[in-house]
Structures are given as structure tokens and as C-alpha cells.
Amino acid sequence: AGSLGATAAQSGRYFGTAVPAGKLGDSAYTGILDREFNAITPENEMKWDTTEPSRGSFNFGPADQIVSHATAHGQRMRGHTLVWHSQLPSWVSSITDANTLRSVMDNHITTEMAHYKGKIYAWDVVNEAFADDGSGQQRSSVFHNVLGTGFIEEAFRTARAADPAAKLCYNDYNIENWTDAKTQGVYRMVQDFRSRGVPIDCVGFQSHFGSSGPPASYQTTLANFAALGVDVQITELDIAQASPTAYANTVNACMNVSRCTGITTWGIRDSDSWRSSENPLLFDSNGNKKAAYGAVTAAL
Ligand code: XIL
């Protein structure tokens, strides 16, 4: 007890946050980070535009700073993310030949995972591959358009070979409400992967919520995915206006699902948030605990 991480650890879970390398020199920031959180997700530093800005030329410097910090402070790392249509350099998105793109994607996964082998608890192997259009199908992306729907399976098989000890996750947003077509599409994919032995260990629910927090079916969604034999994690939590009730409902849903193994908020202070105008986090811009902090602690 006494911190988010220690309280979560009482039930074997972690409590993490997104961290940008640029804030590691801010002692007010790292003071809260290292007091409260026992898991870290790099906010941008492991994304393709940073790690392989030109073909075959890798830059792990910014992410290495974060991993070193985590190692020094006993925090586990979520790797985020290997294959995503966004923050993707144009040299990748302009590839039109399938053999070229497959080899580029596999090399990116293999090289990045090899660099961090043994240091990553869970990787978001593929991020946000499903569409928001109600179809329940994959979205348009260079990976989908050039390689076909099998690109996700290819990515997970390549990832398993690169670091067999890391948990391999599929991560997405707007998959929190059970009846949504997007949720059902991802569910069917995970069900298919499990039935055919395609390696997948976890599903990340980003959980970027509006002010009312999670949908009523949130716990059902987490439980139904977990019943497929995967861990589930809340990976990028933030809630507009940070209502204590909305935060408590979110945490309670995870606590009620034994395979919900951890919760990550997408930043520490409101001023650190990508949604800073919505004040969605657990600490105010001065680093003080907000009411939602107490609600989360009580629910953990
Ligand atoms: C966001 C970062 O917080 C921003 O700093 C960046 O400009 C854009 O990406 N889904 C994800 C995260 O998986 O990687 C995104 O992070 C937020 C939405």
C-alpha cells in the first residue's frame, strides 16, 4: 500500500503510466513516477517513426533511456508498439510490393524485439488495426492493403520467434463496449488465433474514455476476452474530467476479472496528457493527487 503500484501488487497486478523520455530529467515528474508506478509504457519512443526512420537504420536511443530508468527502478515495461498505421514513416507507407513490405515489417519486429529481448513484459505487437466504421473488419492501412488480413498473424508469429518470453498483445481503442462491431471483430480474431495456435497472449484495451467513463458492459468485455485464454490489460487509461466514480468503475472491472493483469494511465499529471485540456489523469498539473486518485486506490 501507499502507492498505486504497491496497492495493485497486493492482487498481483501492476499499475503503470505512459512516460516520454523528455521528462526523465524533471525531478518533480520522476518523483511521482517512481513513488507511484511499477510499470512504464514509452509514450512515443518505441514507435516506428522514432525507431526506424529510414529503412534498416534503427534509433533506440530515446527508448533506451526509458528502459534504463525502468530497470533502475524495478518497473516493468510494456513495449508500444511494433506495427501501427500511425506515426509510421512515409518510406513504409509508400511500399506497394508485398514481398518487400513483409520483409520490412518482419525485420522491424525482429530487430526492435531483439534489442529489448528479456526487458519487456508485454509487447503491443499490432496497434489499432480494426476499423471504426461498424464493419467489424480491419481498417485500411498499408499493411492491410498490401499484405491482406493475414498481416496480423504474420506479425505475431514473427514476434514470438524474436522474444519467446515476452507476452504478445493486440491493442486497440473503442473495443470496450461488448456489442460494438469493432469489439466483436477483434474478439473473433483472437478466438481464431487461439483456435489455430497463432501466438497471442494478451489484449490491451486503451480505454480513452469520455466523462462518463467505461460502458456498462466493460467488465463483460474484459471477462469474455479473458475466457479465450488471454490476459487482458487496461493500457492507456484516461477519462475526461477524471470523475472518481468513472475511475472506480474502470478499476473495479479489472479487479473483478482475474486475468486482468494491470492498468496503465496515459500519463501522470494533467499537464502531461495528450488530452490535457480535459484534465483526464490522476494528478493535477502541480503533481497533487486528485479525487480520482483516492477512488482508484480504494478500488484496487
Ligand atoms: C499518443 C501520444 O500520447 C502523443 O504524444 C502522440 O502525439 C500521439 O500518440 N493510441 C495509442 C497511443 O496507441 O500511442 C497514442 O499516444 C494515443 C492513442
Image (spheres, rainbow, N blue to C red):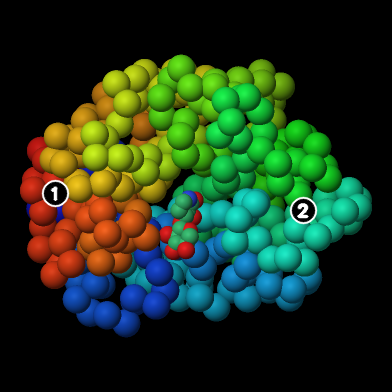
Q: Position of residue 91 (x, y in %)?
A: 77, 66
The residue sitting at 59% across, 31% down in the picture is 133
Residue 142 appears in view: yes
The residue sitting at 21% across, 39% down in the picture is 247
First of labels 1, 2 by sequence position: 2
What is the crowding at mark 2: few (fewer than 14 residues within 10 Å), some, or many (at least 20)?
some
In space, the residues marked 1 and 2 are separated at their CA atoms by 41 Å
Relative to residue 139, is residue 188 depicted above or below?
above
What is the crowding at mark 1: few (fewer than 14 residues within 10 Å), some, or many (at least 20)?
many
Q: Secondary structure at mark 2?
A: helix
The residue sitting at 18% across, 67% down in the picture is 285
Q: Can you identify the residue that label 1 sits on?
A: 293
Q: How many marks?
A: 2
Relative to residue 186, is residue 108 depicted above or below?
below
Residue type at mark 1: give it: Tyr
Indicate the quadrant where residue 71 lies.
bottom left
Q: Can you identify the residue that label 2 sits on?
A: 106
Q: Position of residue 159 (x, y in %)?
A: 67, 47
The residue sitting at 72% across, 60% down in the picture is 108
Closer to us: 68 or 138? 138
Q: Position of residue 188 (x, y in %)?
A: 61, 20
Q: In this view, which residue lies farthest toward the bottom?
A: 25
